[in-house]
């Protein structure tokens, strides 16, 4: 394992003979897994080399003649702008992973929490929230471990995908590599419909919110407008390039959550309010599913971890993001 870790971090990325022997032995024993250390990424090397090339270009351009600079915008200025844009939009640190995870875990679901706890009841809601959060953390731990194992398996087999700097591991590919073809197809179908449902919900929820703010346009018109805007997210290369969007998302979510909490604390409960939830099975399961939706979203965890500087560190990002989410959801649940 130490040999594979050392050779996996070298610049030439040559597979170790010991890794090949492990893969061959695993196949003979009918196993598709290889015991490997967690944590490998090719993304950090690529993006660090990109920043270095931009800085080098800036230094070379600064030595150009003043006559060339008068013909158009200065090359050093262009390089500085490009470097600043890269710093603002690109990141793969633990903190970047925290921003990304925290901004996508709650989002518009924070608006449904008062309804969730009114259906589940306060004590049941808190217990289920802690339970779902624990299961989500453990699920993410398993996914990151499987990602590391799959990456090292690609390296041991000298798979060309491992050396491709533009290649990003997907959920269904790991299922195929570590389990089999049947689970690849199953997971691909599940992820497709999960993302389809999530996208539909987000478009409907956003269009409904804007219809309340600006009822001059119909909900269908708002749905078309926001569907087109959300489609532009396809032009973001990877989850590594969401730094600005993640900051914006977590700021807006935090503001909304604490606005609801403070406003509810100031106004206080109604005089005739009765805390008797859950009142029926249907209401309980509606709240159950809505709360489960808050702590779902694992379909993208593999792609997120793969583009981090060190994929094994995404566990830390995920853990701290859940602690932060508790600071939003728990006060919100108590007061609203």
Image: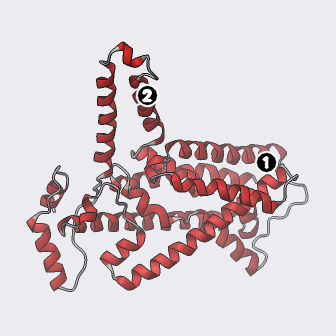
In the displayed structure, 75 sits above or below 240; it is above
Mark yes or no: residue 202 visible: yes
Which is more foreground, mark 1 or mark 2? 2
Q: Which residue is mark 1?
A: 264
| Total numbered labels placed on residues in the image | 2
Residue visible at 74% across and 60% down in the picture: 223
Circles 1, 2 touching at the beta carbon (< 8 Å): no
Mark carried by residue 23: none
Q: Is residue 44 toward the left or the right of residue 285 in the image?
A: left
Where is residue 298 shown, x and y percent of the image? 49, 66
Residue 176 % position (x, y): 35, 78
Which quadrant is home to the N terminus?
Answer: bottom left
The residue located at (35%, 72%) in the rendering is 174
- Position of 209 with respect to 58 (left or right) is right
Q: Is residue 206 above or below residue 90?
A: below
Instruction: Residue lying at the far left in this picture: please name it.
Output: 17
User: Tag 2's secondary structure?
Assistant: helix
Q: Nearer the viewer, residue 283 or 80?
A: 80
Other-residue count near label 2 (Cα within 10 Å), few / some / many at <14 / 14–19 / ≥20:
some
Q: CA distance from mark 1 to mark 2?
A: 49 Å
- Residue shown at the point (34%, 65%) measured from the top left: 147
The residue lying at 42 percent from left, 43 percent from top is 91
Q: How is the image coloured?
A: secondary structure
Q: Looking at this view, is 248 or 323 the one in front?
A: 248
Q: Which mark is residue 78?
A: 2
Q: Tell me where residue 8 appears, x and y as whole percent.
A: 19, 56
The reply to whether residue 106 is visible in this rendering is: no
Local secondary structure at mark 1: helix
In the picture as drawn, the residue positioned furthest to the right comes out as 272
């Amino acid at each position: 394992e130490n040999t594979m870790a050392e050779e996996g971090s070298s610049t030439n990325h040559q597979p170790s003979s010991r890794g090949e022997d492990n893969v061959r032995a695993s196949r003979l024993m009918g196993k598709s897994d290889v015991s490997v250390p967690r944590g490998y990424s090719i993304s950090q090397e690529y993006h660090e080399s990109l920043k270095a090339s931009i800085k080098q270009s800036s230094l070379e351009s600064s030595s150009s003649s003043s006559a060339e600079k008068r013909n158009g915008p200065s090359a050093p200025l262009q390089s500085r702008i490009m470097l600043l844009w890269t710093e603002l939009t690109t990141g793969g640190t633990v903190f970047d992973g925290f921003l990304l995870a925290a901004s996508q875990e709650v989002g518009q679901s924070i608006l449904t929490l008062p309804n969730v706890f009114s259906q589940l009841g306060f004590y049941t809601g808190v217990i289920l929230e802690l339970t779902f959060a624990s299961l989500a953390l453990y699920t993410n731990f398993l996914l990151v471990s499987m990602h590391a194992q799959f990456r090292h398996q690609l390296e041991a087999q000298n798979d060309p995908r491992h050396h491709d700097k533009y290649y990003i591991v997907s959920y269904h590919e790991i299922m195929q590599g570590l389990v089999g073809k049947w689970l690849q197809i199953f997971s691909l179908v599940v992820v497709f419909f999960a993302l389809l449902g999530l996208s539909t919900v987000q478009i409907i929820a956003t269009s409904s919110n804007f219809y309340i703010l600006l009822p001059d346009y119909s909900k269908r018109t708002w749905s078309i407008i926001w569907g087109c805007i959300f489609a532009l997210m396809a032009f973001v290369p990877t989850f590594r390039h969401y730094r600005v969007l993640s900051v914006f998302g977590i700021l807006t979510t935090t503001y909304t959550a604490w606005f609801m909490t403070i406003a509810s604390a100031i106004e206080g409960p109604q005089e005739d309010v009765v805390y008797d939830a859950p009142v029926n099975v249907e209401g309980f399961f509606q709240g159950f599913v809505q709360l489960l939706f808050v702590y779902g979203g694992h379909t993208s965890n593999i792609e997120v971890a793969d583009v981090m500087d060190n994929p094994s560190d995404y566990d830390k990002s995920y853990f701290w993001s859940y602690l932060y989410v508790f600071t939003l959801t728990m006060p919100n649940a108590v007061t609203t």
